[in-house]
């Protein structure tokens, strides 16, 4: 990882919505990012569990950022739609790992070469410290090759 990439990874954790909620990201490799968020006064709801908006915020940009980095500057990658299901109350530190397999990146690249647009769909589970799935986030992206 270059110095610029390390600096960029550091600064994304200072993005105000992440900083305020205590969200921390760590890139594990080119196609994998792990994100965690402790339960604090700043991201707690009236029930003493994780605020749903903070749970979604911790999951929002990662698939698009991974794919944009993997495809390169000749592609446009946007979030098109998202949904979140709250399965259990979140307590303590919660974690999610975002990964796009290299084969899927290549498939998206090939489809974008042939079609006007591609809309890949991704799912990630958010886990508590006991390994329970507390939320499931689904993301629909929009990808196309630049003209």
Image (cartoon, grey):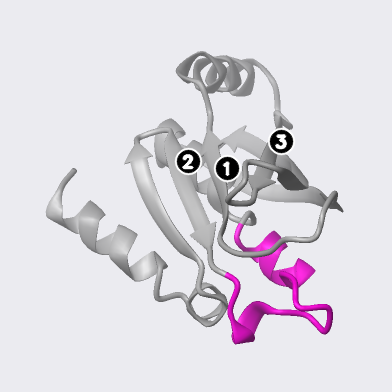
Residue density around tag 1, few if under 14, some if 14–19, many if 20 or more, within 10 Å: many
Residue 128: image location, x then y, percent: 63, 51
Q: Residue at x 70, y 30 (%)?
A: 120
Left or right of 127 on screen, residue 138: right
Q: Kindly identify which numbered label has been placed on residue 123.
A: 3
Q: Are marks 2 and 1 in contact (CB under 8 Å)?
A: yes
Magenta-colored span: 39-58
Left or right of 49 on screen, residue 33: left
Position above or below: 98 against 105: below
Residue density around tag 2, few if under 14, some if 14–19, many if 20 or more, within 10 Å: many
Rendered image quadrant of residue 21: bottom right
Residue 74: image location, x then y, percent: 44, 37
The CA distance from mark 3 to mark 1 is 9 Å
Quickly name the residue at label 1: 63
Quickly name the residue at label 2: 66
Local secondary structure at mark 1: helix
Q: Residue at x 24, y 53 (%)?
A: 5
Q: Quadrant of the C terminus?
A: top right
Residue 100: image location, x then y, percent: 53, 28
């Amino acid at each position: 990882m270059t110095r610029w990439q390390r600096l960029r990874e550091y600064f994304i954790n200072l993005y105000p919505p992440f900083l305020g909620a205590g969200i921390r990201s760590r890139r594990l490799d080119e196609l994998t990012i792990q994100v965690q968020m402790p339960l604090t006064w700043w991201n707690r709801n009236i029930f003493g569990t994780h605020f749903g908006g903070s749970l979604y915020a911790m999951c929002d940009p990662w698939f698009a950022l991974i794919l944009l980095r993997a495809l390169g500057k000749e592609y446009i990658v946007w979030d098109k739609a998202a949904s979140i299901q709250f399965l259990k109350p979140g307590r303590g530190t919660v974690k999610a790992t975002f990964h796009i397999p290299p084969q899927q990146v290549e498939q998206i690249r090939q489809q974008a070469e042939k079609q006007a647009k591609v809309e890949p769909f991704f799912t990630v589970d958010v886990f508590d410290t006991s390994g329970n799935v507390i939320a499931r986030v689904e993301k629909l992206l929009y990808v196309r090759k630049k003209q």
